Image (spheres, helix red, strand yellow):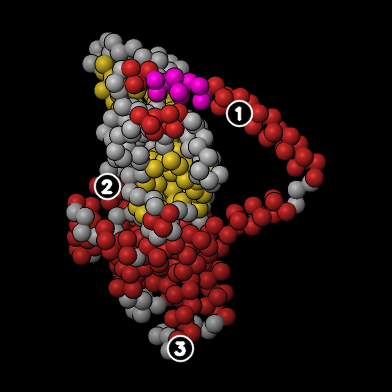
Amino acid sequence: MIPHQWNSYLIIVASFIVALVLSVYPLPLGLRWWRPEFVLLVAIYWMSVFPETISLFFLCAVGLFQDLLESVPLGQHGLSLIIVAYICIQSYQRVRNFALWKEAGWVFILVGVEQLSSNWVQGLAGRPLSGLIFLAPAITSALVWPFFRMGLDRVSGHYQIN
Amino acid sequence: MFAMIALILIGLYTTWLKPIRQQLTFLIVPFYQLTDIPRRVSDWGGDVFTSQTDLRSENESLKIELLIHQRKLLQMAALAAENVRLRQLLNATDMLQDKVLIAELIGVSPNPLSHTVIINRGSKEGVYERQPVLDAFGLMGQVIEVDEDNSRVLLISDPTHAIPVQVNRNGVRAIAEGTGDLNRLNLRHVSINADIREGDLLVSSGLGDRFPVGYPVAEVEQVVRNSGQAFARVIARPMARLDRSRHVLLVFDTHGLTPKTPAEHSAAAHLNSPETAPAAPDL
């Protein structure tokens, strides 16, 4: 399971960079709520492939960088990434046997958890939230997950990361 | 995890992390430049693939517009001179001409709860924190973070932003708060019998010494007076096109300067002083 080549590390880092770019790509203001949480999706994918290799410190660093990028309080995404990663470590053996649509439902829950912690921090920062709109990214993330999963499977298959 | 929570709390309640953030901005600028490329390409395409007839008709309409504005300006010069004389009679200080710098929007904050944008001017061009930002229609917000080449602007519709305003018609003062909705500001603590009507123009009042006086901020859209409550609920719509303007103006504070001597008064009366470069016209 442990990747021996530098190749796979490069792929992992590159996938996170692409996800970071997508996470700040400008969207029309009306659609801003519906942006899937790309960084989190990439993290979930790699956590399910190499649950013991991706370190929480690395995820933490990615989260902090995302905070810098989006200019939200430092630690917001770091915190949510760690929480989700911990859930992933605990559950990856069961989730591997899920069908694709069931996996998408699981992603919906994970992104929902991430949104809860993120919005808790935003509330502390003086931007309180009302309603269920915070689940919008969870819905879109779950919808793109099957395609996302197939795309990344193909990438990792091509570079023989497994 | 607890380290993260501690970091969040430190970041929120102290200013210790601010210098670190500022040091690290150079890391994030490439990302925004990258995401700006599609827009630049489409701009370039729009520039290159325009038909001559389109350009001609645009040129025509711009000429007409220029003529109209020039006529207004002629009147303005006379009015400004008169204003200076009257203010001298009243022994009041001068309304100073504000210097401005044009900037372009290069990014919008991806966080749907915060209304901030990134512009392509920074400390190299003299941009400073708390500097007011306008577009062609009204006040947009203020600068909150400055980097060498870029800076971040907090819009007036952000829920953490508030701006002192006054009604242009009668000078009633109030504070306009952002609501998190781009088309809506709330006026805070307006007494129930204050003279505010629908359609009133709210301009910046200059109280608090952060925003210059007299720029349009919002138009009152709805006034709800409930006799059971102490305050009226006033909802206003920002004049600036917060989600559409690509070019913005940065206003330089001229109030910190020493009071002008009478000789300079007459110079101030001319609206367009010859030494201003076209890139930074006086308003």
Residue B216 badge: none
Please report, as a chain letter, where disc 2 is located: A
Question: Mark 2 sits on what residue?
Answer: A125
Quadrant of the frame with the N terminus of chain B:
bottom left
**Distance of label 3 from label 2 (alpha carbons):** 42 Å
Amino acid residing under circle 1: Gln
Q: Residue at x 23, y 16 (%)?
A: B230
**Distance of label 2 from label 1 (alpha carbons):** 47 Å
In-front residue for pair B250/B167: B250
Q: Which residues are magenta?
A: B76-85
Q: Is residue B209 left or right of residue A107?
A: left
Report the magenta stretch's main SS.
Answer: helix
Residue B70 badge: 1
In-front residue for pair A37/A23: A23
Q: Which callout, 3 or 1, points to the residue nearer the camera?
A: 1
Percent x, y of residue B67: 66, 28
Percent x, y of residue B156: 38, 37
Q: Residue at x 60, y 56 (%)?
A: B40
Amino acid residing under circle 3: Gln
Q: Are marks 3 and 1 in contact (CB under 8 Å)?
A: no
**Does B82 appear in magenta?**
yes
Question: Mark 3 sits on what residue?
Answer: A5
Q: Are marks 3 and 1 on the same chain?
A: no
